[in-house]
Every structure is written in C-alpha cells, then in structure tokens.
Amino acid sequence: MFDLGLMLKGLRKENNYTQKQVAKKLNVSVTTVGRWESNYKLPSTEHLIDLSVLYNVPLNYLVGREKKKAIVIEHLTKNQQELITMLVLEFESAHDNKSRELTQRQQTIINLIFKEFHNQHD
C-alpha cells in the first residue's frame, strides 16, 4: 500500500526543508504539513500540485502512480533540454558499463551542459 505521508516526509527531508519552511512556501500551517506527513489529513489537489512543483517531481510520482522520478525540463531553453535529454539517454545506454568512471561521451555532454548553463547566466 502506498503511504503518501511517508512520501511527503521523505521528499521534504531530501530537499532539506523543515515543516515550517514547507508550510510557509505553501501558505499553510505547520500543523497542516504535519498532518499530511502523518496521513491524518490529505492535501487538496491544489496543494498536491504545489508540492510536486516544490519538490520538482511529477504529480504521478508524488501520489505513487509512478515509481521513477522525472527531470522537469520545461523551463529550460531548447538547447538545454536537448543536452539534458542527451545525457540521460547516454547514461541509460551505458547502464551495462560496470565502470564507475564517466565515459568520454558523458564527460563531453556534461561539459557542454556546464557551458550552456554558464552562458545563460552571463
């Protein structure tokens, strides 16, 4: 059985937030956040959406419908999206590689990503 409260608490801790910080960001009380995490009360649909945005996870993952986390790239430039997608595909294709070192292709893509994101902030 899926435990939404445990998921919410885990994501909060993974993102280094306190209950107070989450409450402030979502404009709810600390008690409400605690009740969500203890499964005493369920978040509204609006709050579930806000939580998925806050924790940068798809709503389906947040509510236990998907087991994989996702990388949200919609706010990135087209070139940044392509580079991130390329890197993910490269890591997936190299999954069988038992080496703990990055391949040359992975290193090249990571360098391109650093350059692209650096150029955006200049």
Image (cartoon, grey):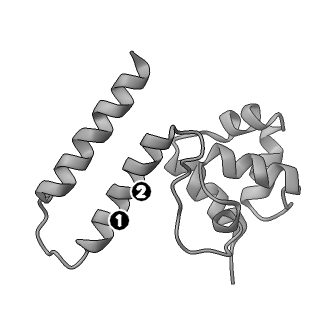
- Which is nearer the eye, 26 or 115? 115
Check the image and report above or below for 56 versus 22.
below
Check the image and report above or below for 15 versus 91.
above
Q: Position of residue 55 (x, y in %)?
A: 61, 48
Q: Do the numbered discs 2 and 1 sit on residues whose CB atoms are within 8 Å? A: yes
Which quadrant of the figure contains the C terminus? top left
Question: Which circle marks residue 89 in the picture?
Answer: 1
Q: Say what secondary structure mark 2 lies in.
A: helix
- Which is nearer the eye, 72 or 37? 72
Q: Position of residue 86 (x, y in %)?
A: 35, 57
Residue at (53%, 64%) from the top-left corner? 69
Question: Which circle marks residue 9 in the picture?
Answer: none
Q: Residue furthest bottom?
A: 1
Task: From the viewer's perspective, tell me whether residue 109 is left or right of residue 98.
Answer: right
Amino acid type shown at disc 2: Thr
Residue at (41%, 56%) from the top-left corner? 85
Give the quadrant of residue 99.
bottom left
Q: Position of residue 121 (x, y in %)?
A: 42, 20
Q: Position of residue 107 (x, y in %)?
A: 17, 49
Local crowd at mark 1 within 10 Å, few (<14), some, or many (≥20)?
few
Amino acid type shown at disc 1: Leu
Q: Say what secondary structure mark 1 lies in.
A: helix
Question: Which circle marks residue 85 in the picture?
Answer: 2
Q: Residue furthest front?
A: 78
